[in-house]
Image: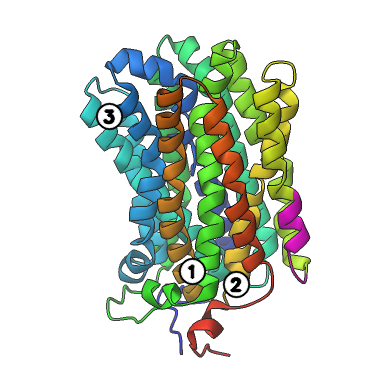
Amino acid sequence: MIDDATAPAHPDTRAQRVLVVVGIVVVAFNLRPAAVSVGPVLDEIITGLGMTSTTAGVLTTLPVLSFAAFGALAPWLARVLGLHRITLLALVSVVVGLALRSQTANVPLFLLLSLVALAGMATTNVLLPSLVKLHFPDRVGLMTSIYTTSLAVGLTLSSVLTVPLSEHFGSWRWGLFAWAVTALVAALPWIGLVRHDSAPDVAARGISLGAVARTRLGWGMALFFGFQSLQAYSVFGWFAQVYRDAGFSPGTAGLLLGVITAMSIPLSFWLPSWAARMEHQTWLIVGLVLCYPVGYVGLIVAPVAGAWLWAVLVGVAASVFPVVLTLIGLRARTAEGTAALSGFTQSVGYLIAAIGPFGMGLTYELTGGWTVPLIGLIVLVVPQLLAGLMVARPSYIEDAIGVRTAG
């Protein structure tokens, strides 16, 4: 029997459900700016802080490493502190990290404060599917559509607006600081929601990550998520620089990156609901993932002439991400199972993803160009596709583990 230690003490009222929806939407908006806003002004950060290329590679890899390390702790923290309390604390961590890092001139401190912000992002990243399953168990597809759309909007705006904000206020520091303000706004609904957590129960038994690790479903989800995130964070971390090296201005490079992220806005709203209605998601996964190699080959062959088209194709491929998040909710029967599957999927997945941005930067430094790094991303589409096919058909993590559920 699974006892949902994170459940509200009493059924949600209409006002509480509205507040939960608002809270989920504003949290989702703030899940990517701390990571994505760095890429468009990376040259300015390197110059302003005297950062080496190797350290810049560490900076672009920090998001995935943080999501791996802190995401694994999120299900336990939710049981101990309460799902809403830990969400609020995570948002406070984002605000503090983003605000302070934008003002420091010290490279190690800049990295440390980035880690503080990313730790908060990692925690909420893991818990959002569980929040959806807890409050809207019969609306997983719809709610995932809503929050992944908000995530895509936040991702797009942070990639497009960071450079204009930096230019308007006269420094890249204020371009980064702006996203601390949006995170502060996101924390407000959760101040009201913490009152509806049940009493923390340290002794509450949940599904352990070790139990998930002994299942084919757990590893299939982790690999699919991992290789998708590897692709995405390589793009977010380096493509603005790829475009600048191809001859585009910083502003245009930011817009091209914005096109990639903007593609996920309409697709994020549509794909999760569609995926949830499908008996299996095989052809949806195949169609989306195969857009990656087409876009990458185009970028190698005609980086300037076809730049906008290749950006659209890479953006379509990256929209497999909301499908992965939908599958996390669909492959569990309970909020507790969702939290465990999400925690394992994202912690292991982001360890895999860390190879991408760091490896892309290292390969660029060794070869002096972007052709070899892009070929590497093309090769890694193969395991991503195979992992996606592993989880495309219906199954449940509780059944795989052998855990009985209530009801």
Q: How is the image coloured?
A: rainbow
**Kind of residue at badge 1:** Leu
Residue at mark 1:
341
Residue depicted at 57% across the width and 64% down the height: 132
First along the sequence among labels 2 and 3: 3
Local SS, label 3: helix
Q: Is residue 55 above or below residue 3?
A: above
Label 2's element? loop
Whether pointer 2 and pointer 3 mark residues with C-beta atoms closer than 8 Å, the reply is no
Does residue 200 appear to the left or right of 27 in the view shown?
Answer: left
Residue range corresponding to the magenta coloring: 279-287
Disc 1 element: helix
Query: What amino acid does circle 2 point to?
Result: Arg
**Residue in the picture at 59% in, 10% down:** 247
User: Dot 2: within a 10 Å radius of its alpha carbon, few (fewer than 14), some, or many (20 or more) residues?
Assistant: many
Near-viewer residue (306 or 86): 306
